[in-house]
Image: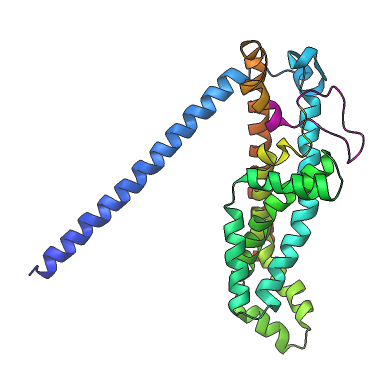
């Protein structure tokens, strides 16, 4: 039988060991991430130039720039946002504010969380079946954007609902007590404080979508197109697919390896800017709400 002091000492030792394990895990992850980022930056930044970013590709992508891939990535991300953001936020509001909290609602939430963990290649194959074949959009910018929108949708719904849950119940009760309708209460008292968290989840989901290769692999992405897409039904270039082909499938991998590193650096920079934008916007809206 241990004394009170011995139990206290054992808990302290266990706590210190747990915190030490967490710190070591954090340092290990940060070290590996730092090595990867250093390798890509050191080998990719030397390729960057104004021509590399703004020029069209030439001679099978062994020369020229990656401007169509940058523009195509932006286009397909915007199309994904047009589907995922309104539908995701509306679904989160319905689930959290209007839906009866029962077995069906719990089942929907479980399904959304399971969908968020589904491999992206499954969404790609579903996009081929639904948008390319059944709906007849062919391999196009529209089909790829809608597929990425479906990929982002479960994350958007979950993040938006979690943000709504952080708003105290007293806000809702106070608004209804003052005679506001439910929608007026949600629009004026619930959405403003929840907006920073919702916005962060949306941008992080879109940042993930911008770097995905599998969903656009069969739905519209092309490796070499020396022009910009002129309609939603055109094929397009995208940075992740472009990088995948150059790193694994190109007929002269050693010759295009510097271009692959430059493409990887640009893609990381775009994702970093999206994440940074989420942090800045969340900080500003949170500060505005506190005022």
The residue segment tinted magenta is: 223-242
* Relative horizontal placement of residue 87, taking residue 34 as reference (left or right): right
* Position of the C terminus by quadrant: bottom right
Q: Residue at x 67, y 61 (%)?
A: 157
Q: Is residue 163 above or below residue 240?
A: below
Where on the picture, by quarter, is residue 231?
top right
Compare residues 64 and 181 and report the one nearer the observer.
64
How is the structure coloured here?
rainbow
Q: Position of residue 21 (x, y in %)?
A: 31, 46
Tell me which secondary structure the magenta stretch mostly adopts. loop
Q: Is residue 51 above or below residue 244?
A: above
Q: Position of residue 44 (x, y in %)?
A: 62, 20
Where on the picture, by quarter, is residue 7?
bottom left
Check if residue 230 falls in the magenta segment: yes
Q: Residue at x 66, y 84 (%)?
A: 173
Compare residues 154 and 41 and report the one nearer the observer.
154
Compare residues 238 and 261 and report the one nearer the observer.
238
Q: Residue furthest right?
A: 230
Q: Is residue 214 above or below residue 192?
A: above
* Position of the N terminus by quadrant: bottom left
Q: Position of residue 174 (x, y in %)?
A: 68, 84
Residue 78 shows in the view: no
């Amino acid at each position: 039988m241990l004394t009170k002091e011995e139990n206290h000492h054992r808990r302290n030792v266990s706590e210190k060991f747990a915190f030490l394990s967490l710190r070591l895990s954090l340092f290990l992850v940060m070290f590996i991430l730092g090595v990867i980022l250093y390798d890509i930056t050191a080998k990719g930044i030397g390729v960057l130039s104004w021509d590399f970013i703004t020029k069209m590709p030439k001679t099978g992508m062994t020369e020229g720039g990656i401007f169509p891939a940058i523009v195509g990535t932006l286009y397909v991300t915007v199309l994904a946002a047009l589907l995922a953001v309104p539908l995701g936020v509306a679904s989160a509001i319905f689930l959290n504010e209007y839906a009866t909290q029962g077995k069906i609602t719990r089942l929907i939430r479980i399904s959304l969380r399971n969908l968020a963990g589904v491999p992206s290649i499954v969404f790609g194959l579903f996009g081929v079946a639904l948008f390319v074949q059944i709906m007849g959009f062919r391999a196009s910018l529209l089909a790829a954007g809608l597929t990425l929108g479906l990929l982002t949708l479960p994350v958007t719904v979950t993040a938006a609902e979690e943000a709504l849950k952080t708003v105290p119940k007293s806000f809702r009760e106070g608004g209804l007590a003052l005679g506001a309708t439910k929608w007026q209460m949600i629009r004026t008292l619930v959405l403003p404080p929840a907006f920073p968290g919702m916005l962060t989840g949306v941008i992080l989901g879109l940042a993930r979508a911008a770097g995905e290769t599998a969903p656009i692999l069969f739905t519209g992405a092309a490796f070499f197109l020396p022009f910009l897409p002129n309609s939603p039904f055109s094929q397009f270039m995208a940075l992740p697919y472009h990088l995948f082909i150059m790193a694994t499938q190109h007929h002269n991998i050693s010759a295009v390896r510097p271009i692959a590193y430059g493409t990887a650096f640009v893609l990381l920079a775009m994702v970093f800017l999206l994440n940074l934008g989420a942090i800045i916007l969340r900080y500003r809206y949170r500060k505005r709400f506190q005022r």
